Amino acid sequence: MSRATVRAIRTVLALALLAAPAACAASAPLPARAIELNRDGAIAMAGGDLETAEARVALALEYNPRFTEAWVNLGLVEMMRGNFERALRHLVRARDLNPDLPAPHHALGLLAEHELRGADAEKHYRAALKVDPGFAPARINLARLLFERGALDEAREHFLRATQVAPGCVEGWTGLSETLLRLGRIDDSDEVLVRAHARFGADPLVELLGPDGLLLARDDDSGGGLNSFLQGVLPQDGEYTLAIRSARDDCAGEYLLTLENGWGEQSVQRGPLPLQTEVSGALSVASGARRDVWSFPATAGQRMTLILDTDGPTRVQVANPSGDWEVVKSTRGRGLGVTFEPSQTGTYEAVVFADTSRPIQYRLTLEPGLGRLISDKGPVPLGQRVEGEIRYAEARDRYTFEGRQGQRVRITLDRPGRSQLDPYLELLDPDGRTLAEDDDSGGDLNSLIDVTLPRTGTYTVVARGLGDTTGPYVLTVTLSGGEPTPTPSPSPSPTPTGPPATPSPTPTRGPAPPSPTPGPR
């Protein structure tokens, strides 16, 4: 279990599979056929067949309209479709039918996470645990949210309890190990890893050696979970060697090795990815379609950007004509921007991976240059609050203002309410060079820049999120020490005036974002 895998603290989705008679608020026992239909509906949902899932669960409710778990599963179906209001109605009905079951509270927490309402999600997960302290999915999801917002001591307590109530759930162990690591307790973190390996077996690592015995490629976890996955174009004829070993020296176990031409049986060749045309797809481990492969032409040195919208933990990897990965990005269920400059001219392939065992749906767009990652908002109204939103990781909103030498500028970038954005500010001088940048000087993750302008001219304020964070923000720019040049209100839509500059590397802190900490599943 490599560190990269440990950092993938995932969301746990609990499907309401079976119900004992007491689990329904009706006085009569549930019909056996209703229980069977609800179970089959949950299985269909896990396999990504939402139409079949809805039909079976709805039929179960015809047998007994007070079947609480069936209402939960119907709500989860609508949540996976993106029908959040309908999902909320079903889940509230389930909770009202039987508030003493943990499943409705937990499902309401999943829905809140899908809507990026982290505080509400925590509240619902805690309600589930109040009903049943042994309900592991709520325990793990609560711990993950606490970890993400930096409440590490409380996160450690919940992950630790998860390993006791559900020792067979790997997320509890990986979450506990990573939390201990963040707390600086490295030896304790390693000990948890050793115990996890003893329970869950090997973490395979595969190496490909060429005919000359030299290492060509190595992989640990690209196959999802702890599994390995290699792909590429062989450089020459000859006899190649695959070396299989454990990623750690302190664990061992059985493995299954498959060698296939092309992308393998769990991949679907989706064909050409048109420029500036949105495509969509659905991935599910249960259905055998874990990866979608899209192809597109590219020219060396001409920047391109992939925009991904997804409802679950997803990874995008771009392979060049030689079969080597040029870029790898992941998201737990939020918008993702993947920008890169091709190193070769030829046909590239964008591979969309499901980094979760539950079904996901996604939309993908290929755009020239930086595409919608850069949005030029025009002049910023001085002294006024300007509301905006960063929708994609690595996206930038750019504002301008006219300043004079010796004036002092104060810029704040705050995250309002329940925004998940970790604000990051940059100030560029009239030549486009970075004059100042800040992460947390404004307190509570907010950004603050307060500097004296060295010259007269047009300055640029860049608002973005740290790492892969996204969400709404509030920007305020104030000038003092002289009469500022009047500025009009910002344009209602982006008005780029020339080719945007390439974004600078995004600093990161702490563990890599869950591909890992994906969104709810």
Image (cartoon, grey):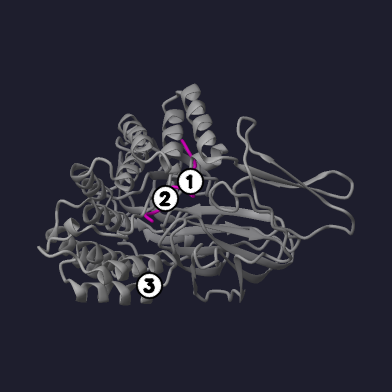
* Residue type at numbered disc 2: Arg
Foreground of the two, 509 or 286: 286
Query: Closer to the observer: label 1 or label 3?
Result: 3
* Quadrant, the C terminus: bottom left
Q: Secondary structure at mark 3?
A: helix
Is 131 placed above or below 112 here? above
| In the displayed structure image, the side of residue 286 where residue 324 appears, left or right | right
Residue 22 point in image, percent of width and height: 17, 56
Residue 86 point in image, percent of width and height: 23, 70
Residue 511 sits inside the magenta stretch: yes
Q: Secondary structure at mark 2?
A: strand
Q: Residue at x 54, y 61 (%)?
A: 370
Residue tagged 3: 50
| In the displayed structure image, the side of residue 221 where residue 183 appears, left or right | left
Foreground of the two, 442 or 444: 444
* Residue type at numbered disc 1: Asp
- Cα–Cα span, label 1 and label 2: 17 Å
Residue tagged 2: 464
Question: Is the stretch drawn in magenta largely helix, strand or loop?
Answer: loop
Residue 188: image tag: none
Q: Residue at x 65, y 71 (%)?
A: 296
Query: Closer to the observer: label 3 or label 2?
Result: 3
Q: Which residues are magenta?
A: 510-521
Query: Closer to the observer: label 1 or label 2?
Result: 2
| In the displayed structure image, the side of residue 137 where residue 210 appears, left or right | right
Q: Disc 3 vs disc 2: Cβ atoms closer than 8 Å?
A: no
Is 276 placed above or below 185 here? below
- Comes first in the chain, label 1 or label 2: 1
